[in-house]
Amino acid sequence: MKLFFNIQGGDFTHAGHPSSEVKKVLKQLNIDGKTIKNIVISMYEAEVNVVAHAYRGIINVEIDEKKITILISDEGPGIPDVELAMQPGFSTASKEVREMGFGAGMGLPNIKKNTDEMQIETTVGKGTVLKMVNYFS
Ligand SMILES: Nc1ncnc2c1ncn2[C@@H]1O[C@H](COP(=O)(O)OP(=O)(O)O)[C@@H](O)[C@H]1O
Ligand SMILES: [Mg+2]
C-alpha cells in the first residue's frame, strides 16, 4: 500500500495530519499498538521539522506485510552538520517557533529512538530527505 502527503512550511495547523492518517491505516491493519506509537511519534516529529525548518515537503509512505517505509523529502536549507543536529537539545528553531511550543531539539533524537532504521540525506541550500523504516513485530 502506498500513501502520499504534502507538507507546507510554516503550516503548524496541519502538521500532524499525515501521521494521524497513517495511524488510522495501521490500526485497520491490526499492527500492534507499541509499533504504531513509535511510527506516529517519529513521523510527527519529521513533519514538524519540515514545517519548522523547510519551505515545503512531500511524504511517501509504503506499507507491506513486514514493514513501513516513510520518505520525507523537503525543499529547504538542508542540515549543515547532521551529527550536531542529532544531539539532544540542539535546535536552530526561531523564537516564533519556540513560542509555539516547538524547537526543544528532541525531534531527531526521538526519531532515532523510535525507528528501526533512519537515514538522512541532505544538501545545504537544497533540502533534506529523511528515510525511516519500522518493522512490524
Ligand atoms: N528538515 C529539516 N531541514 C532543515 N533543518 C532541519 C530539518 N530537520 C531538522 N533540522 C535541523 O536539525 C535541528 C534539530 O532538529 P530536532 O531534533 O527536530 O529539533 P527542533 O526541531 O526542535 O529544533 C533543527 O533545529 C534544525 O537545525
Ligand atoms: Mg524538530
Image (cartoon, rainbow, N blue to C red):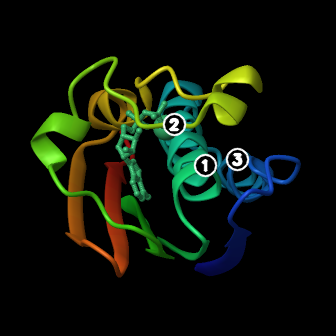
Image point 38% across, 27% down: which residue?
Answer: 110
Q: Which mark is residue 119?
A: none
The reply to whether the residue tagged 2 has its Cβ within 8 angstroms of ligand 1 is yes
Q: Is residue 126 above or below residue 15?
A: below
Left or right of residue 29: residue 112:
left
Please say if the residues under marks 2 and 1 sit with CB atoms less than 8 Å apart.
Answer: yes
The reply to whether the residue tagged 1 has its Cβ within 8 angstroms of ligand 1 is yes
Residue 27 rendering spot, x and y as whole percentages: 71, 45
Q: Residues within 10 Å of mark 2 (few under 14, many from 20)?
A: some
Q: Is residue 120 visible?
A: yes
Q: Which residue is mark 2?
A: 93
Left or right of residue 74: residue 10:
right
Q: Which residue is mark 3?
A: 23
Residue 125 rendering spot, x and y as whole percentages: 33, 77
For label 3, the SS is helix
Q: Which residue is mark 1?
A: 52
- Give the Cα distance between marks 2 and 3: 27 Å
Quadrant in which residue 73 is drawn: bottom left
Pick the quarter of the image with the C terminus.
top left
Pick the quarter of the image with the N terminus.
bottom right
Quadrant in which residue 98 is drawn: top right
Q: Of discs 1 and 3, which sits in the foreground?
A: 1
Q: Type of residue at label 2?
A: Ala
For label 1, the SS is helix
Q: Type of residue at label 3?
A: Lys
